[in-house]
Amino acid sequence: MTELQKLCDKVPSFPDDIAMALLEEELGRPWSEIYSELSPSPIAAASLGQVYKGRLKENGDLVAVKVQRPFVLETVTIDLFIIRNLGLVLRRFPQVSIDVVGLVDEWAARFFEELDYVNEGENGTRFAEMMKKDLPQVVVPKTYNKYTSRKVLTTQWIDGEKLSQSTEDDVGSLVSVGVICYLKQLLDTGFFHADPHPGNMIRTPDGKLAILDFGLVTKLTDDQKYGMIEAIAHLIHRDYDAIVKDFVKLGFIPEGVNLDPILPVLAKVFDQALEGGGAKNINFQELAADLAQITFDYPFRIPPYFALIIRAIGVLEGIALVGDPEFAIVDEAYPYIAQRLLTDESPRLRSALRYTIYGKTGVFNAERFIDVMQAFENFIRAAKSGGGEDLKGSMAELADIGTQQSTSLVPSFPMTISQSEQPVKARAALAFLLSERGDFFREFILDEIVKAIDAVSREQLIQIAASFGVGNATPVFSMAPVRARALLPTITEEDRVILNNVEKVVKFLTAGNLSNPTIDGDVNVVYLVQELLPVLPGISSKILPDVLSRLSSRVFARLIREAFL
């Protein structure tokens, strides 16, 4: 492993005179006409090329000049040809489930692209454009297209030290930024930097994360991006039947294969992976190794595109583990996934979000709701790190959504309990729920609040009726087609579960600042609602009418059902 690490930037260099001759041949003139200075020997030498430090004549910019090794294209082409032919031979043996030819084809296509420095420069420019709005704390060197060819690449020089070797206090924060950056590529842009080795991830002197070398990238389809998020949602609920079908969509299992023998094996692998505290604590490397083992016994394979992803995420996790032995890539990834579920408007991710909260049973899960919102807040904190907040990155600014409180009137409810003198402190999750981007997710909790208000209203009616002896009164409507008993509401066990759910959610949204959430051990929902109202912006104009409309429909439907059935 130590020897392989040297391939990053410590490979013996090829002669400088050959490099200068190649540079002149590629750019059409002597290097001295382009650069006012150029280091006499390479600053770093890797397996495919070596880098010189120079300065442009035209504007004085410091630049990195990468020159490709002679005959590397020819040498590797022969190697790939031999390996591919061996793969064709292996196809004759059905017990070998690894698609060597497919893997080589995928990797070779990326490799030939990597040897085209014009393509690498375009990739870097495209990547920078994708990141500058959301993650301005991620730096990508500018490409000077005028001085770039297939075998020579001129880019902006970036000072810094390898992230994996830095001892600065902000390394942990920059690792979090790196995780968000790679997840954005993997699950959002679909344009994935597949070569994040330690030499390509730099901490700049001003505390930003610089990513270098865009020769090796892979592109993901929408089906692959959404399919991975859906699989994670199913994994959270241990819905292995659905996960097996996800694997078919993602190309792990061929279409038409009998899934019955594979299901218990995958269930066992994921049960073991989830033992340590749920999906967030999965060891990605161990899980990848266990899945790879299945390929020897079942029609299950690692798709070529996913092999590149496993490699990239494994390297990223390795860099993080150097500074933090407790680092878990899946745990770090969950906040980004929560943010994607909450803010993406695609029907497939909306469905995945609903499934995450309601699961297979269709029952609202307060713990899962809170889990997603906490992860969202953790994402905001991570997006602010590395200078994201100061640079006004749009991901960091998610924390500001909906924080402007409106001055609309809040209706008061007649209650016997006085409001606390101190206002409830709202949190980022609540601000998001009340913003336009939180409309879809807000529907979930509004449904539960309506059910809770209905339940607590019935409970109070029962208490009032009991004080007048209505519960024991002679039925005066005995000749009517409705039963008098039906006019008295009932509180079910389901109602109490709903009330408990609302208590949990409201306490979370108000940062646990409620001082009197229960009365004699029972949930005091009326108090919770009254405490929550002062921090709900626009409640009277936007949310309350929706609640009242749903509540009236629910009460009317229940009265009809209980009275006539």
Image (cartoon, helix red, strand yellow):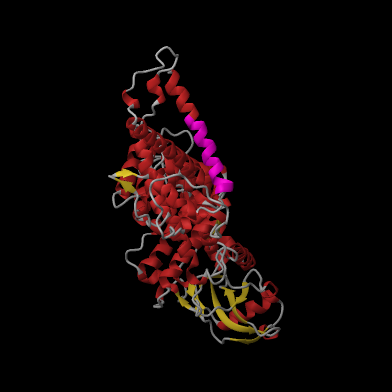
399 sits to left or right of 292: right
- SS majority, magenta: helix
Which residues lie in the magenta part? 540-555
479 w.r.t. 341: above or below = above
Q: Position of residue 110 (x, y in %)?
A: 55, 58
Q: Quadrant of residue 326?
A: bottom left
Extreme residue in the top direction: 479
What is the total number of numbered labels drawn onto the structure image? 0
Q: Position of residue 560 (x, y in %)?
A: 47, 23
User: Residue at (55%, 65%) from the top-left corner?
Assistant: 135
Quarter of the N terminus within the rendering: bottom left
Which of these two is toward me, 251 or 109? Answer: 251
Extreme residue in the front direction: 468
Which of these two is toward me, 209 or 293? Answer: 209
130 w.r.t. 554: above or below = below
Quarter of the C terminus within the rendering: top left
Q: Position of residue 7 (x, y in %)?
A: 45, 71
**Residue 182 shows in this picture:** yes
**Residue 360 shows in this picture:** no
Q: Position of residue 101 (x, y in %)?
A: 49, 49
User: Is 72 one of the magenta-colored residues?
Assistant: no
Which of these two is toward me, 33 or 57? Answer: 57
User: Is 548 one of the magenta-colored residues?
Assistant: yes
Which of these two is toward me, 501 or 256? Answer: 501
User: Residue at (40%, 53%) from the top-left corner?
Assistant: 508
User: Residue at (45%, 14%) from the top-left corner?
Assistant: 481
